[in-house]
Image (tube, rainbow, N blue to C red):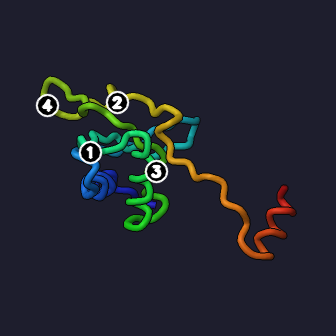
Amino acid sequence: FRIEPGEVAAHLCGHAWVREAVVVAREERAGEPQLVAYVVAAEEAQEAQLAATLRAHLVGQLPDYMVPAAFVPLAELPLTVNGKLDRRALPAPQDDAYARRGYEAPRGELETVLAQLWA
């Protein structure tokens, strides 16, 4: 799949809670790159719900493979002396940066049977 991090960042900046954003691919596990969004949040943003809210915002606009796995809030984006983004200074995402889904009970008879098979 072709992923344009700039396009993902542009969609993030369309949310009211985001002032600035940058998206990068990071290899957290060997050979498994994941998209990580670094976000400078607006004042009205609720940091506790930031990852889940931004993920929900992007799911309706982008394909699943372009939705970042983690959303890291920053006070400001780190810059080099030349005023460019310092990618090496971007921190690794903490556990709370990942948007996680809560448990959803099976709906209907078929999902119940499948859930029992996999239990």
Location of residue 44 by image quarter:
top left
Mark 2 lies on residue = 90
Three-letter code, disc 1: Glu
Mark 4 lies on residue = 83
> Along the polypeptide, which appears first: circle 4 or circle 3?
3
Q: Answer with left or right where residue 41 lies relative to residue 55.
A: left
Three-letter code, disc 4: Gly
Question: How far apart are the two marked residues, 3 and 2, measured between alpha carbons?
Answer: 21 Å
Q: Is 36 above or below relative to 53?
A: above
Q: Residue at x 46, y 39 (%)?
A: 97
Three-letter code, disc 3: Ala
Label 3 crowd bin: few (<14), some (14–19), many (20+), radius 10 Å: some
- Whether tag 4 and tag 1 are in contact, CB under 8 A, the answer is no
Mark 1 lies on residue = 44
Question: How far apart are the two marked residues, 1 and 3, measured between alpha carbons?
Answer: 16 Å
Quick one: SS at disc 1?
Answer: loop
Marks 4 and 3: which is nearer the front?
3
